[in-house]
Image (cartoon, grey):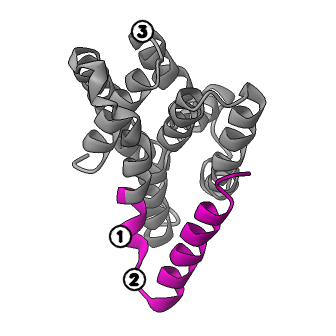
Amino acid sequence: LLGVAPFAMICGVAMVASGIAPVAAVLMSIFVFAGASMLAASQFLSAGEPVTMLLLAVFFINLRFTMYSASLRLHLAPLAWRWRLLVAYLVADNPYAVSMARFADHPQDRHKLAFYLGVSVPVWLCWQLALAAGVLIGTRLPPAWKLEFAAPLAFLAMSVPLLRDRAMTAAALASAFTVIAAHGL
């Protein structure tokens, strides 16, 4: 939760800074519940990019949830339809990772749903509250501060801890150079 709250707050500030109405930002968070996609959407909106490009980017960013769902299915498939819908709605990076580690260590556990909900619901609540706080903060900051940088900064902050070896660093540098070289496109 200590990692979720700051990310959600940055997301809320970035959404407001990009011109998304505060109520719309909070509703988007409730209905979408995908932070990276919300940050990307705020970036695309602030840059005036076409909605089709925004939707395409969000689609590719969220493809990972397909893989998450497929592996969760191995553990939660016997659940009733309504529980599977709730699990699908609550799929997020942190709860997925923690749950899969637990399920690998306790494959015969009969309380997998309870564990998953015990991890996912607090993350969801923390995200929603912190995002709403970020939205409130964002509405009180002067527009002259130009906070559109918050979204790229959040992505950068998420990426830096992944640079653990030469291969990851080389991939990040190649990506950075490609973005700079292709900026005009």
* Residue 32 image-quadrant placement: top right
SS assignment at label 1: helix
Please report the residue visible at 78 percent of the width from the left and 30 percent of the height from the top.
52
Residue drawn where x is 49% and y is 53% of the image:
96
Residue type at numbered disc 1: Pro
Please state which amino acid type lies under the numbered disc 3: Val
> 10 Å neighbourhood of mark 2: few (<14), some, or many (≥20)?
few
The dot on residue 23 is 3
Disc 3 crowd, CA 10 A, few/some/many (<14, 14-19, 20+): few
Q: Which mark is residue 2?
A: none
Q: Residues within 10 Å of mark 1 (few under 14, many from 20)?
A: few
Instruction: Residue 177 in the image: state x and y as whole percent.
Output: 58, 71
Q: Which residue lies under the disc numbered 1?
A: 161
Residue 30 percent across, percent down from the top left:
47, 21
Figure check: 151 above or below 112:
above
Look at the image and tell me whether residue 98 can be seen: no
Q: CA distance from mark 1 to mark 2?
A: 7 Å
Which secondary structure is most common in the magenta stretch?
Answer: helix
Magenta segment range?
Answer: 157-185
163 magenta-colored? yes
Work out how far the residue at label 3 is from the one at label 1, CA to CA, in angstroms: 32 Å
Residue 164: image tag:
2
Which is more toward the observer, 66 or 151?
151
Q: Find out whether the residues at labels 1 and 2 contact each other: C-beta distance under 8 Å.
A: yes
Question: Up-down: is 3 above or below 133?
Answer: below
Q: Nearer the viewer, residue 108 or 7?
A: 7
Q: Nearer the viewer, residue 114 or 141?
A: 141
Q: What secondary structure is marked by label 2?
A: loop
Q: Amino acid at mark 2?
A: Arg
